[in-house]
Image: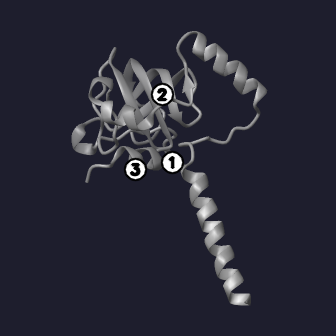
Amino acid sequence: MTLTPAEGLSSSYAVFTGEVTNIEPNTATKFGGVEITLRVRKVWKGEIGEQVKVHTAGSSAACGYNFAKGESYLVYADRDEADPMRVSLCSRTALIANAQEDLDFLGKPSQGLDGADARRKSKARRRDNCSASRGPVGRGGLGWVLLFLAGTTLTLRRFS
């Protein structure tokens, strides 16, 4: 089953674009596979620096994503105790050239890491000590407001 861009975003630990700068065997985790180093350009979700390493299985038969050095990707990464940043063939990870639907859905990134934009964001982050992810504007907050209103209504009806 293929995830929608919304499902990919909500189920991922991090979503970002980056250019592959290095590919080597993964010795960081016991599962082996491949370690991919990316120069990060834009971030929609997660706390990502200018460079990140992600892991994937060594072959597509084991759900490994086939990255190519020098290419740029939209990456949907998962995280667990065994592997801090993992990418699989089942995620929505794709070459930038093939990711227009996702980029349209994601909209403006929460963080850009190219040139002056990165310096401006870095200064803003130092002033703002809040580390909470802002997420898609309006969606999460609206759900909580509706849930609160429904609970209040039920409580009032019970006591009237």
Q: Name the residue under label 2.
A: 53
137 left or right, relative to 27: right
Between the C-alphas of marks 1 and 3, the distance is 18 Å
Percent of width and height locating residue 153: 65, 77
The relative height of residue 80 versus residue 154 in the rendered view (above or below) is above
157 left or right, relative to 92: right
Label 1 sits on a secondary structure element that is loop
Q: What's the residue at 57%, 47% (across, down)?
A: 138
Q: Is disc 1 in contact with disc 3, using a CB cutoff of under 8 Å?
A: no
Q: Nearer the viewer, mark 3 or mark 2?
A: 3
39 left or right, relative to 111: left
The residue type indicated by label 3 comes to Glu
Q: Mark 1 points at which residue?
A: 80
Label 2 sits on a secondary structure element that is strand
Percent of width and height locating residue 95: 30, 26
Q: Is disc 3 in contact with disc 2, using a CB cutoff of under 8 Å?
A: no
Question: Which quarter shows the C terminus?
Answer: bottom right
